[in-house]
Structure formats: C-alpha cells, structure tokens
Image (cartoon, grey):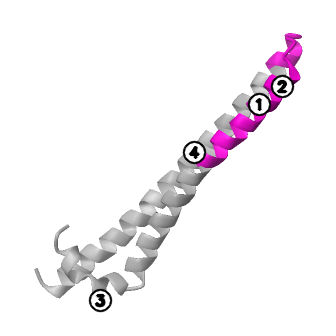
Amino acid sequence: MDKKDKIELCFKQAELGASRWDRRRNDEWKVTLLFWGGLLASAKFIREANVSVPLIFLIVGGISFIAIYTFIWLRGLWRANYNDKNWEFFYRAGKGVKSSLDSCKDI
C-alpha cells in the first residue's frame, strides 16, 4: 500500500466521523422532541383526567425526569458528538496522515 492509498483511507475515516456526527444529530432532535412531547402529553392527561397526584410525587418525578434526561441522554450525546468531531477534525487537519499512517493501514 503506497502513501496515496494511506492518505485516502485516512480521509475516508474523516468522512465516517462526519457522517456519524450528522446521523446522530438528525436522530437527536427527534428523540428529544419525543421526550418533551411525552412529558407535555402526560401532564395534559393528568390535568384533564382530574387525577389527584400528591405534590411530592410530582416533585420527585420531575427531578427524576430531568436527572435521567441530563445524565443519561444528554451526557451520552455530548460525549459521542465530541468524540466524532475530534475524530473528523484530526483526520481533516492532516494530523492523521502525518502521525498515524501505520494505524491507517490496518483498516
């Protein structure tokens, strides 16, 4: 494998990082909209059905929802987006071509 092929493989890695980032971003807004829509729909249902829910359950449920949303969903998204962007920028800047040609040949 000559140097040109290795460079081409490294740029394909950069494209893969960009495509993963774009695909995740497309899915992210859909799932987030679904979460918040579900929360609003459940609040509307409880209000219209005249269900008496103790205040402590509402507070604990709201805090739990926000904590789960933040620490499980958003944290995972932020980490995955950060990794994919760094992967893409690393290879787009040519650092992957210069410093890791040996790792590109294993692909």
Residue 69 horizontal/vertical position (percent)? 65, 42
CB atoms of marks 2 and 1 within 8 Å: yes
Residue 103 horizontal/vertical position (percent)? 22, 75
Marks 1 and 3, Cα distance to the nearest angstrom? 53 Å
Marks 4 and 2, Cα distance to the nearest angstrom? 23 Å
Q: In which quarter of the image is residue 56?
A: top right
Residue kind at label 1, given as amino acid type: Val
Q: Quadrant of residue 47?
A: top right
Q: Is mark 3 on a helix, strand or loop?
A: helix
For label 4, the residue is 72
Q: Residue at x 37, y 78 (%)?
A: 91
Q: Which residue is drawn at 86% across and 18% down?
A: 54
For label 1, the residue is 60
- Does 47 lie within the magenta span? yes
For label 2, the residue is 56
Rendered image: mark on residue 98: 3
Marks 2 and 1, Cα distance to the nearest angstrom? 6 Å
Q: Which residue is drawn at 31% across and 70% down?
A: 12
Q: Quadrant of the C terminus?
A: bottom left
Mark nearer the viewer, 4 or 3: 4
What range is drawn magenta here? 45-73
Q: What element carries label 2?
A: helix
Q: In which quarter of the image is residue 11?
A: bottom left
